[in-house]
Amino acid sequence: MLRNRITDIPGLRVGHAGDPTVASGVTAILFDAPVIASVDVRGGGPGTRETDLLDPERTVERIDALVLSGGSVFGLDAGAGVTAWLAEAGRGFPVGPLQVPIVPGAVLFDLLNGGDKDWGRYPPYRELGFLAAAAASDDFALGSVGAGTGARTGNLKGGIGSASATVPGTGFTVGALAAVNAFGRATIGGGPHFWAAPFEVGDEFGGLGSPARVPADSLAFPARILPGSATTLAVVATDAALTKAQCRRLAVAAQDGLARALVPVHTPLDGDLVFAVSTGTVPLADPVADLARLGDAAARVLARSVAIGVFSAHSLPGLAPAPPLSVMGLPPAWRDRFGGG
């Protein structure tokens, strides 16, 4: 039975580490064995580590982990912490007597979220990366944890979301994880309905469905404009046996999930990107049709993950509250969750 997490793909583990005082943190995605991976970057302001090697023409085929971090450029240090943990565990690419872990990553911008960023000469992200890797397991928390600790969206607190699904017509499973720190909004205007509502499974993000009508002002461009101030980072994973080029195509298709869940998205103000990984345990029967099915499923699972991340988030002490939503007539749990930001 699926747990509705990216770790429904066997061989994946996820760990978080965060500092509520700094209002930031790190999420590490570890693989029990090296995996094929690629990436698609759509945002205009990305911050990345070792993503060039994920191009299909690059030499290195497999990676040992991925790291998502807050902290903007300072958060790139998190990769060193995850690398150190893997090296101590004897993981990595053999180079003479050494094992060199391959750990691509990306960062989101949370420097202006109200947390105490007076951390002295060195930021805390290397240590947080190490702790996140050490905490990796099949089961992990959602919401205001890890890289989503201090995340925000255009109108609500952001956070970590994850979902999974089997792929109809195949033997594949696909999962996604998102660190939602978006310039745009995951909800429709001032109400509690999510843009991703058509793809919801059960009541995983409230079960309200779509509104009878989408208000015209819900499509208004956000008033808060600060270049480089937002990013949604995502990982999609599958047990289908994909090449590096096919992983790249899966990441491209999965980007539609961000477009279905956030408005606006992929702006010059965001660093939005999607990593795609393959554990390679289930062969493709038809390289074209199966990859198309995977891409369709990945987009839907990623849209759900974004909404789940926002729905699961909670405010932190010291962070400015998000604007209240219109919650009249909703169940008490929804009023408690969204009434005060």
Image: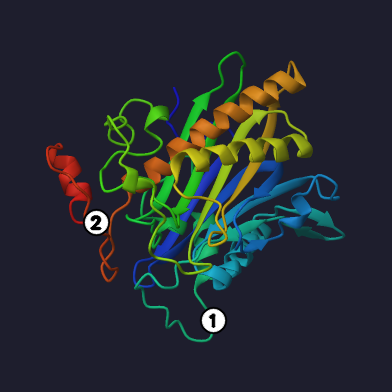
Q: Which quarter of the figure is the N terminus placed in?
A: top left
Residue 188 visible somewhere in the drawing: no
Q: Amino acid at mark 1?
A: Tyr
Local crowd size for mark 2, using a 10 Å CA cut-off: few (<14), some (14–19), many (≥20): some
Residue 329 position within the rendered picture, expressed as x and y whole percent measured from the top left = 12, 37
Q: Which residue is mark 1?
A: 122
Q: Residue at x 42, y 49 (%)?
A: 160
Q: Residue at x 64, y 61 (%)?
A: 48
Q: Are marks 1 and 2 in contact (CB under 8 Å)?
A: no
Q: Which residue is mark 2?
A: 341
Which quarter of the picture shows residue 196? top left
Residue 109 position within the rendered picture, expressed as x and y whole percent measured from the top left = 49, 66
Q: Earlier in the sequence, mark 1 or mark 2?
A: 1
Residue 129 position within the rendered picture, expressed as x and y whole percent measured from the top left = 54, 63
Residue 285 position within the rendered picture, expressed as x and y whole percent measured from the top left = 74, 16
Above or below, 40 relative to 47: above
> How many angstroms separate mark 1 from mark 2 (CA)?
32 Å
Q: Secondary structure at mark 1?
A: loop
Q: Residue at x 33, y 43 (%)?
A: 216
What color scheme is it?
Answer: rainbow
Residue 45 visible somewhere in the drawing: yes
- Left or right: 37 in relation to 23: right
Nearest to the observer: residue 284 or residue 208: 208
Which quarter of the picture shows residue 283? top right
> Looking at this rendering, what residue extends furthest in the top direction?
169
Local crowd size for mark 1, using a 10 Å CA cut-off: few (<14), some (14–19), many (≥20): few
Q: Secondary structure at mark 2?
A: loop
Nearest to the observer: residue 281 or residue 160: 160
Mark linked to residue 161: none
Q: Amino acid at mark 2?
A: Gly
Nearest to the observer: residue 260 or residue 238: 260
The total number of labels drawn is: 2
